[in-house]
Image (cartoon, helix red, strand yellow):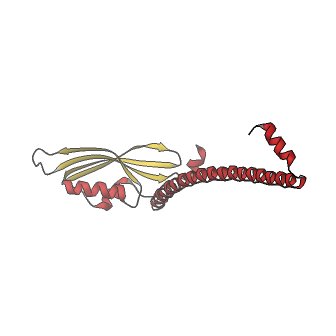
Amino acid sequence: MTRQELIDMLQGMESRTRQRLGILLAVILIVVVALSAINRRTSTLERKRIAREADLADMMRLKLQYVTANAAAQRLANRVGAIKPDDSPAKIIDQIGIKGKSSSIKPVKGDEIPGYVEDAADVKLEGLTANELANLLYRLEKGAQPVTVKKALIKQRFDDPSKLDVSLTVALIKPAPAGAAGSR
């Protein structure tokens, strides 16, 4: 059907029928425009939902990392809080009670850590068994005070291969005195 035939057909109709047909076409056009706007809004909301779900997944991952880091920081704060002013690496090793045949403990200068004082010592223990060494290292690292083993030299004895000579550099981390922390 050509355009002219369509115009002729419409002009041949009654005016009331043409008016109803025009209103019907206008209603259909309004419905199509409204559905298009609703679809566009739905698409926008869907994109926002997907973006927020991705953000939420990232936040849940970050929350887990935060909780883990916060727990580790709290454990360290509790360990630092358990330190008495007279604590030293020598005292801690004496408290553990693993001595071997002979032992010597010599204080050394520790590294500088902002807000903390590192009390370090060279510890030499001779004639330890592998089990005693494992227990010593475990108690140092997992004990109540924040102690780190900075260096470990382990030698097997020639006269008794089941015994070990151990040289450790052990550091006790203490909070800096109030006056020293402010002067830095």
Furthest residue toward front: 12
Can see residue 108?
yes
165 lies left or right of 38? left
Furthest residue toward left: 159
Task: Say how many tags the image has.
Answer: 0
User: The C terminus is located in which quarter?
Assistant: top right
Camera-side residue of 123 and 45: 45
Percent across and percent down for residue 176 are 52, 51
76 lies left or right of 150? right
Camera-side residue of 168 and 121: 168
Q: Which residue lies at the image location 81% right of the left edge and 51% below the top edge?
A: 26
Can see residue 91?
no
User: The N terminus is located in which quarter?
Assistant: top right
Q: Quadrant of residue 92?
A: bottom left
40 lies left or right of 154? right
Furthest residue toward right: 15
Q: Which residue lies at the image location 49% right of the left edge and 59% below the top edge?
A: 74
Percent across and percent down for residue 13 are 85, 50
Q: Is residue 109 above or below residue 32?
A: above
Camera-side residue of 72 and 24: 24
Percent across and percent down for residue 42 are 66, 53
Percent across and percent down for residue 53 are 57, 54
Q: Which residue lies at the image location 40% right of the left edge and 61% below the top edge?
A: 144
68 lies left or right of 7? left
Q: Which residue lies at the image location 49% right of the left edge and 54% below the top edge?
A: 65
